[in-house]
Amino acid sequence: MLLRYFYDERLAQASYLIGCTRTGEAMVVDPARNVTPYLEMAQREGLRITHVTETHIHADFVSGSRELGSRSDATIYLSDTGPAEWKYGYAHEPNVVLVQDGDAWSVGNIRVQVLATPGHTPEHISLLITDTANADAPIGIFTGDFLFVGDVGRPDLLEKAAGMADTAERGAQQQFVSVQKIKQMDDYLQIWPAHGAGSACGKALGAIPSTTLGYEKRFNPAFRFGTDDEAEFVRWLLHGQPEAPRYFARMKHVNKVGPQLLNELTAPQPAIRATLDAAIARGELVADLRPAEEYNRGHLRGSINIPATSSSYTTYLGWFVRYDQPLHLILPSHDEAHALRTLTDLRAIGIDDIGILTGPAALTGELDALPATDVREVVRHMNEGTTQPLDVRGLTEFEDLHVRGAMHIPLGFLPTRLNDLPRDRAIAVYCASGYRAHIATSLLRAHGFRNVECLCTQSIRWANEVPSESSRVPITIA
Amino acid sequence: MLLRYFYDERLAQASYLIGCTRTGEAMVVDPARNVTPYLEMAQREGLRITHVTETHIHADFVSGSRELGSRSDATIYLSDTGPAEWKYGYAHEPNVVLVQDGDAWSVGNIRVQVLATPGHTPEHISLLITDTANADAPIGIFTGDFLFVGDVGRPDLLEKAAGMADTAERGAQQQFVSVQKIKQMDDYLQIWPAHGAGSACGKALGAIPSTTLGYEKRFNPAFRFGTDDEAEFVRWLLHGQPEAPRYFARMKHVNKVGPQLLNELTAPQPAIRATLDAAIARGELVADLRPAEEYNRGHLRGSINIPATSSSYTTYLGWFVRYDQPLHLILPSHDEAHALRTLTDLRAIGIDDIGILTGPAALTGELDALPATDVREVVRHMNEGTTQPLDVRGLTEFEDLHVRGAMHIPLGFLPTRLNDLPRDRAIAVYCASGYRAHIATSLLRAHGFRNVECLCTQSIRWANEVPSESSRVPITIA
Amino acid sequence: MLLRYFYDERLAQASYLIGCTRTGEAMVVDPARNVTPYLEMAQREGLRITHVTETHIHADFVSGSRELGSRSDATIYLSDTGPAEWKYGYAHEPNVVLVQDGDAWSVGNIRVQVLATPGHTPEHISLLITDTANADAPIGIFTGDFLFVGDVGRPDLLEKAAGMADTAERGAQQQFVSVQKIKQMDDYLQIWPAHGAGSACGKALGAIPSTTLGYEKRFNPAFRFGTDDEAEFVRWLLHGQPEAPRYFARMKHVNKVGPQLLNELTAPQPAIRATLDAAIARGELVADLRPAEEYNRGHLRGSINIPATSSSYTTYLGWFVRYDQPLHLILPSHDEAHALRTLTDLRAIGIDDIGILTGPAALTGELDALPATDVREVVRHMNEGTTQPLDVRGLTEFEDLHVRGAMHIPLGFLPTRLNDLPRDRAIAVYCASGYRAHIATSLLRAHGFRNVECLCTQSIRWANEVPSESSRVPITIA
Amino acid sequence: MLLRYFYDERLAQASYLIGCTRTGEAMVVDPARNVTPYLEMAQREGLRITHVTETHIHADFVSGSRELGSRSDATIYLSDTGPAEWKYGYAHEPNVVLVQDGDAWSVGNIRVQVLATPGHTPEHISLLITDTANADAPIGIFTGDFLFVGDVGRPDLLEKAAGMADTAERGAQQQFVSVQKIKQMDDYLQIWPAHGAGSACGKALGAIPSTTLGYEKRFNPAFRFGTDDEAEFVRWLLHGQPEAPRYFARMKHVNKVGPQLLNELTAPQPAIRATLDAAIARGELVADLRPAEEYNRGHLRGSINIPATSSSYTTYLGWFVRYDQPLHLILPSHDEAHALRTLTDLRAIGIDDIGILTGPAALTGELDALPATDVREVVRHMNEGTTQPLDVRGLTEFEDLHVRGAMHIPLGFLPTRLNDLPRDRAIAVYCASGYRAHIATSLLRAHGFRNVECLCTQSIRWANEVPSESSRVPITIA
């Protein structure tokens, strides 16, 4: 048996290829939409991908199961264990097989057994693996978003992101049962989860690739509850879960009905200035991915700057994009390989409708500029009350320490809360490094707030610490 | 004034960017369809592409004028000098300007003047360039396919490739007039042609990037004819021109009506074995681009092997493709950047309808194999007359030396001459290195000739030179 | 705690980086000599490499511990558990700490405990890891070459490769004790070994990245022996171990005294033809890494062709190189990045003294050529006894099936057994694919055997199966 | 005849390969030190480099003639036309041939004739090329630094950069004679110069790759002087030449005695913090090539930041480096290919002695930080006279417009003029974009000026234009 790990750092998402080196058959578990790495690995190892499976309907990325099925002769194994509203929409396609708790199949000499583990989602399954060529007992379990290193999957995503009322508590109860069930299994079993540290599918995922059931029984907090502690478990599980990104609702839907194949997508258009202006006029999102300095020097009025210099730029696009409209992109360069990577990044989270994809050559004619911020001046105005501080960091960051009098709107929520902002005075946006504040600044300016300043906590602190005779700054980080 | 050369080695095609560094405006002359290099160069040099022009309706590659116009704010300047049947079909688009002999425009401080130079084609123009910031006389001429280094453009392509009767001689007469006309201009002028050595648009192009009018007057054979020698010139010009590749007719058409924009193309499909088999059954071309050894080990019956290991693979695809049907491709790997480059290669010669684009993962199930050739055995059979030698090299190669009794069909013509081949005995295909013979072998086998052997001249010679007692080989290269 | 896997496919060698995300400290376990990947990973994860350790004196690759210590501020932890002859020669360097069974240290919140596990080598240690921030019991063990997935390390390398008499049995007994000792530990512990499938450090390594102690207790054959079965264990362990590559002896030595730092190495020289000829005349190894076809068309007499087209080319260089002489290389191209990768490949197995490093530009003047083989003819001569078949495959391949009358010398041993070959008749070398036979052919020709033919088993079989009237081939694969 | 252009954008330096496609011989003219591109091109075109030549002893980059000679079998043709002090120091090497005015040799069918053209340097030659296969008169001239597009080479470099008294005027007189001489030749000849726009070897080089003699006769200002106008020509030529970079003197010396072969160079060392600190303590230059933001967050006290984000970073290294000491580098990453490119960049201008080459892993322990500048505050202090403005731009930039009261020291001269700076008050360095001011800031801080602020003209202008009630800023750009 051969096992290879795949890990998408951007999404903190793990997928796996297992293969039988004797028969040349291979299976991919929880594939991402960019299926090239699996095909390349199989080719390198002399294997054919004959099986594809996934543990559940993912909420945080577009599943590659259907795509991989279309690019190989593989059969796709999908869970049929959930209630009616959690059935796959493409289950009728000829290469799909639906499976229930207890079902099993073989990939060469490898035996795969289905274990229903609802909780994170109602239809969630885990996959028990036995290398029958060498052993008569299982070697490990692909646990998907049920069991992570040091954590279990959150049951509240459906309610929070997909707006399905009263599912969180029910999910937590199911998760309790699933945990009690797996507790009965052997300590030595390997646990291969679908996410690592940084994923929003749990609250405390560890940064090691895999774990063992015995270690989790000992140190994973979800396992410290006894068979009578269901209520306590539910309370513990539902507490302190991070905010669910807005695009999760869309992912749920897409993965349930079946993601479009990449070759079915419409190719994005190049564009000239007029086309971009028209898109902005129609209220569509034009995201300028160039570095902040280039945007500051000259950009289209109404475009939002989300610099691709940070690897988390797709996350913010995911918050801002409206899936019923095309997204338009201005790239930093005309390099086609770079354009291809950008498309791959966005398609990973289901942003399929790229209307315009263009380089800076389209930025002709008159452009807006964004002047540098005079930090000390802004700090003075915040102290005098003529400028409103706006904190766009996360809740825990805000609670830790913030500027006195600051409003708090995490960046992702800003597009839906523009009406809460004062229009009678200047706004000073800040975050930790300035990256999120810069995005927010461009967003506010695009929505008519022209008097916006951009700061980072470090510069504010520095303005406090280096007083000059003319302006002794009384502002403090509250 | 800034001037940059672009050269596509595969097509032996030259294009140019000239820019005015004071005003930031730039013009591209005879752009190829992959316009990214021009956009990147302009960005790097701080220029905007404001003008695009081409010297004529190209026959050997898809023009990038319309594409470049769509990706920038550039105006496109097209010749209006030809007869009715050589008018551009997209001249009505808002960013197109039609020009006549004597017309002129400015790119910043650069003056561009139109010089009608028919001959290669009726609507052919050249562009006289003056750097008005530094000089009051021209610096050089973009001569397109009118005047090359050491040669002039052939006038017979329309007749040979596009099947337009009686145009060759008329073109040669026009070419004579154009040559006499340019002869009057100053020796010091630079000549920037649209092709270099290896192009099929002339017969003897030199391998240096540019030349001067004075040097051509002295040493270009086209200039040795006096004003009374028209008939002699016409005879000389029409003699010894190489065969025109079959796809030239298509290019002419495409460039006249206006090439599709790249973003308007349908994306190719991935595919499984069954889809490929169905395409072959429908009689469509399935080209396997993997190396010969991999193809020999296992391939789809009916697929043609055109190994992408040689840079001339697109030329053979250009001979074989039928533009009214999709072309299907099996690539050597699953790498997406490689797939993108392949598409770019093919789109350069207008192969836009790629039906299926897939990696070797689609090669599942039972496959055909191609055994190695026993050279000495085949040579013996050729001598005994039980095997028919088939030479697929060019005419000059064949005339130089060939196997006694060999049929001669250049590889490009093979698809249309299959009926000329004997079906009652084995066929031994050969060429110089074995590359063309290998393609021919896979083509013949795909068309039901199962008893085909593949040789190269070197191996034949070797079989002659190393006789064994059992078979003293009398065959000779005739 | 953060854990990252590194895997060198060429050497089937695993190494690991563990880091404490709270304090920013990190440790690398069993680093390879090319330490860039560790430094890059640490930079990306915001960690500093503060500790380096290795489980034992490696025999199959150059350790990167000393190199990594010189490129960071890390302290190096080395085993002091072996007898006098297995003490590290660079233990006195200021950043080295020697450790004994039971010693422990901390990497931030990670606790590292030394476990003496002799057997594979006398000084072998394993490292028990506890993530004290989250747990009060260990999470897993870095077992080096003691315990693999499905196997244990072989104890006979010192005897076979380093020529140390009577150490194999003693090592097997120690290995027995080590296995009994680890058997007492908990099932749930993860096992992170230093090698995967394909390594010559054991006989049956599995192709999955890591395992658990419980799984190995159940299915690893080394664990099925009871406390009284030492003799049986020793017999089992010493049986059927593969041949140890010749360069292993050198690696042992190098890693013991301390490998040279990369910046201390002398840069290789470019060269002209005369320099290469002189090197060959001095009896030094000139390895031509170009593809076989290019070598066949023209090469230096006396140079050996080891095509870099196969990823195992370094292995054969490792068999052929004489560590007391410079190795000279002719590369396929002049690309410097490629030259750098080649150097990195060779330095990984301690080939530090590259005398000449040159591209094909040095191949001027008169060159040797290698004609193609007429398989059927050679087969006939083998049958007639006028040509001696020589099988250069491995022992198991040979025992499976071979040409009747063939001599058997595995390729790696060929340089030392040239005197066993007949000089009175032709030699026909063969292997499975032709790769090893081709190398052998060039080697034999370089040593004066000019009448050498190169075959593969497939072509022999084909010559048997497609008889012609003139030569019915009676030869069989014995 | 085949001709290929090579152009190094960083150095604005042109070199050429010409080859005879019939005989396969090729010559490189004025090669750069990184000779790989020539070797690769020759391999691709099926040519052997048999001849190497250069037009003169270059002052602005290390010649690759000797390097290329050592990597091929080529003979090197060097000028012997200058006085005793301008003879090549490696002329005695066996593959060197010295040539005089009128000498000639053949590269296959290509005839090369030497034309003495002193002026830029005493030993300068040009090379007249005739393609004898097709013509009985020359096609063009490689004019080196004698004749450029729109300019002629400056004759004052020896005096300014190499400190050779009274050579500038003598050179100008020679240049006059050379121009008069070439004026006699035919208009149609192509002119292939050794530099393009941006080079410091002349004052007004055009941005097109090549020109013709006729065009230069008409529009190059050097050609407008009649045979009696020598004095006027000399005055014109010596006026307005830009400052010669400090490293030019070194280049002259190196290229005269013969540059070291790359394989003779000592490999740079990796390093830990302590080694870097020691180097700084010894007064050696430690250049930190990371982006400014990373340097600002944490750097070694005493290191100079020259961000490799600009392609002109090597120019500033060339001004600052002391060729009698090792230069130490801190790179932005641990990527080895990047390190190799950096070495290639530096070796191009003769910086061979890289002592330490290390990534950011060496930046351990306590680090210095550089706080952001409060522009308005600094502007206020400049107005109040408590901060000294320092302009580090070029003379023409300074003369155009500058801050009232500013000192002017171009960045390149700053290391030698530190004593001119006031130590009793703060210094505010500025340039156009902030790049040079940032380098200057790090340089000043490294030399004990701790109270240094960094500005750009744009931010100063902005501070002026957006007055606040507290500080109406009277400062103006003078």
Image (spheres, coloured by chain):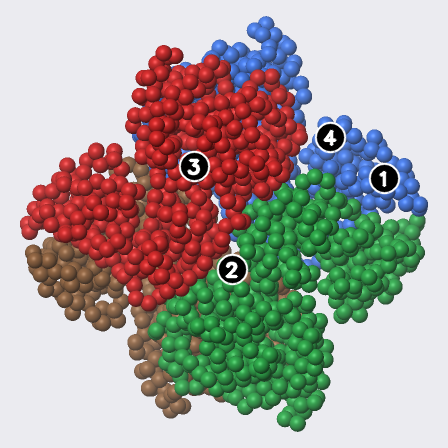
Chain colours: A blue, B brown, C red, D green
- The reply to whether residue B441 is visible in this rendering is yes
Relative placement, left or right, of C247 versus D142 is left
Residue that label 2 marks: D264
Q: Chain of mark 2?
A: D
Helix, strand or loop at mark 2:
helix
Helix, strand or loop at mark 3:
helix
Residue that label 4 marks: A397
Do the residues under discs 3 and 1 have CB atoms within 8 angstroms? no
For label 3, the crowd category at 10 Å Cα-Cα, with few meaning under 14, some 14 to 19 and many 20 or more, is many
Say which amino acid is labelled 3. Answer: Lys
- The reply to whether residue B89 is visible in this rendering is no
Residue that label 1 marks: A464
Task: Identify which residue, B423 or D32, lies in the foreground.
Answer: D32
Q: CA distance from mark 3 to mark 1?
A: 61 Å
Q: CA distance from mark 2 to mark 4?
A: 56 Å
Say whether disc 1 or disc 4 marks the residue closer to the N-terminus.
Answer: 4
Q: Chain of mark 4?
A: A
Image quarter of the N terminus of chain B: bottom right
Say which amino acid is labelled 4. Answer: Glu
Among the 4 quarters of the image, the one containing residue A468: top right
Residue that label 3 marks: C252
Q: Is residue B5 above or below residue A280?
A: below
Say which amino acid is labelled 1. Answer: Asn
Q: Is residue C387 above or below residue C254?
A: below
